[in-house]
């Protein structure tokens, strides 16, 4: 199987040659695309690397899912509807079995998200996947990290720390069971896109740990936050569970801020769509993060941090 | 220097926070972009990997230049004007000196091409750069690989085999001199974009070797080509020189086809812009590539091939 046969067999079937906004898909020097009228585009890119973002023995379907999910999550955080993606795949050898499972993972999630593969590159090298996504949002309606205001409630769209717990289970040798799912198949919260657009002042997705990510929202605007530990949905409900919820990465829930007076209509709209979210704190003047709740002192001393690629590697990464 | 300081110091300065079509640049979950009205977009992605696409001891400025140039070349081949790009950088360690030279390489070429960095990801791993570019072209005017017709002349926008010769010189230990430039700093033929748009039936860029790339233009449409070896601009003018011109990669000249009756106006427009191109053959019925010229028989027996990542590694790659 040569490079072109590989693309033809496993990736061209995922790419419409011509459908909707795709005028010309995979197979040329570039794809030709028609952006929807009256919209801004949102563009993001993320790499996942074997041994860093996922364990080397991770199932190929999970690797594909993760690579696309982390990018879709960025679109969701900006309230942009997925349109197109490109795939740059570096892999050590061309195994048909591996590629078949990998492309299946892409097919399932891209189908669910309504995003079309429109281009790519395949090179022989260490296992790594870089996906670049483009989405659309009505002009001027993208939700950024910069809109948070003092008094806003800080909300999350799902439980935190589950992916970190799943990874721990994987590292202990567990290979089956529901506990692994949040780590192996993180869910990008695309269903929240219309609600963010209508209600959120600011938003981001939790990829490197809630506290680290939240700081990206607060620091550039010189804001602080108060987090109510009693409101965190975490397991176990002890110090370890809280630390895992506050620092564990890979959850890809959305964290957004909303005006308290808009909370009721938001919850009504969310419930009508069978969606749930919870308030975990609020934006306060000043800087830094304060904790409230029974274990606040002990959490403060745990010196919560997230993942950093070049300075502060935590046990969570690199993966075995 | 942590990951965020690194981005802030070396890459944020390359990204307009808000200018022209960029409503929001680097620093959020995604960039917010306004596509030009009445246009199609062209999107392409390419990875360059140390030891495969460039020697491991290549200067960082050259690596950055190459990573962007190969992608710009894809836009040029589709006749799309550069707009935005994202950068996914995997590097083993965060050396300020290396990053400074690398970002300088990006700055120079992106400034020349008028393309804005709008997002990225930086991970700790083997040295690899994946860039994704988006360009624009008036609606319906993209030039693809699919428009070639029997009787079209096959043209190239520059000499072939110079990059392969430069690489050979590098591999022999040469570290200075003009001969290295075509390999270290390939030129994306952006100046040809308006001419391709107005004259070319089909086009692509020569990245893996003329003959291999030309086949992508011919095979899907069951066309053949006749190449006149006397018309190739190559050095030396012997069998080795011809083989290098026909199979050497990394030149990033454009190969396009044009109707013979449009040749004269094309040349007039090209000359007015101080551009030069040459006819090297023509599209013929049937399949495969025929050679004409004094050394045709010997070239035919040299079994010209290009680079393939998973089946046929040639001495040109992997790089030492």
Image (tube, coloured by chain):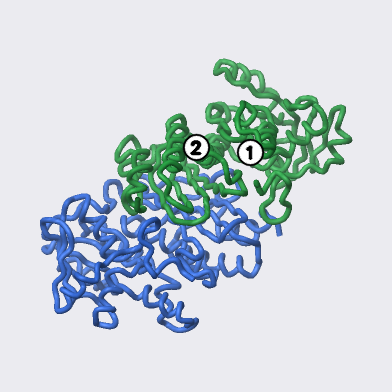
Chain colours: A blue, B green
For label 1, the SS is loop
Q: Nearer the viewer, residue B266 or A143?
A: A143
Left or right, A105 with respect to B4, comes to right
- Label 2 sits on residue: B61
Residue B148, visible in the rendered structure: no
Would you place residue A306 above or below residue B96 in this image? Answer: below
Q: Residues within 10 Å of mark 1 (few under 14, many from 20)?
A: many
Please give the name of the residue rendered at 57% of the width and 17% of the height, measured from the top-left corner: B274
Whether residue A313 is visible? yes
Q: Residue at x 51, y 48 (%)?
A: B129
Which residue is the site of mark 1?
A: B250
Q: Residue furthest front?
A: B173
Q: Is residue A28 found left or right of A113 in the rendered image?
A: right
In this rendering, the answer to whether A220 lies above or below A275 is: above
Residue A195 image position (x, y, % from top left): 26, 62
Q: Chain of mark 2?
A: B
Tell whether A292 sits left or right of B7.
Answer: left
In the picture shown, does residue A225 fall above or below A137?
below
Bin the neighbour count of mark 2 within 10 Å (Cα to Cα): few under 14, some 14-19, many 20 and up.
many
Name the quarter where the N terminus of chain A is drawn: bottom right
């Amino acid at each position: 199987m040569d490079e072109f046969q590989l693309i033809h067999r496993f990736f061209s079937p995922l790419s419409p040659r011509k459908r909707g906004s795709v005028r010309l898909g995979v197979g040329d020097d570039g794809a030709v695309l028609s952006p929807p009228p009256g919209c801004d585009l949102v563009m993001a890119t993320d790499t996942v690397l074997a041994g860093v973002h996922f364990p080397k023995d991770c199932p190929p379907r999970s690797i594909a899912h993760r690579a696309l999910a982390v990018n879709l999550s960025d679109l969701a955080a900006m309230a942009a509807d997925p349109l197109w993606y490109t795939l740059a795949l570096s892999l050590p050898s061309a195994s048909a079995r591996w590629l078949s499972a990998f492309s299946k993972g892409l097919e399932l999630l891209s189908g669910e998200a309504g995003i079309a593969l429109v281009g790519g590159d395949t090179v022989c090298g260490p296992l790594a996947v870089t996906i670049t996504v483009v989405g659309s949002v009505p002009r001027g309606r993208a939700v950024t990290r910069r809109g948070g205001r003092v008094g806003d409630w800080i909300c999350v769209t799902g439980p935190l720390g589950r992916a970190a717990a799943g990874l721990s289970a994987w590292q202990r040798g567990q290979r089956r069971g529901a506990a692994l799912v949040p780590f192996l198949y993180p869910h990008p919260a695309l269903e929240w896109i219309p609600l963010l657009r209508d209600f959120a002042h600011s938003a981001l997705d939790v990829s490197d740990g809630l506290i680290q990510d939240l700081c990206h929202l607060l620091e550039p605007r010189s804001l602080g936050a108060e987090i109510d530990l009693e409101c965190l949905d975490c397991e176990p409900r002890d110090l370890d569970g809280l630390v895992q919820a506050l620092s564990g990465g890979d959850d890809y829930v959305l964290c957004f801020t909303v005006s308290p007076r808009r909370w009721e209509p938001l919850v009504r709209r969310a419930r009508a769509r069978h969606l749930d979210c919870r308030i975990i704190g609020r934006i306060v003047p000043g800087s830094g993060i304060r904790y409230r709740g029974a274990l606040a002192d002990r959490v403060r001393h745990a010196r919560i941090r997230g993942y950093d690629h070049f300075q502060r590697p935590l046990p969570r990464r690199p993966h075995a």
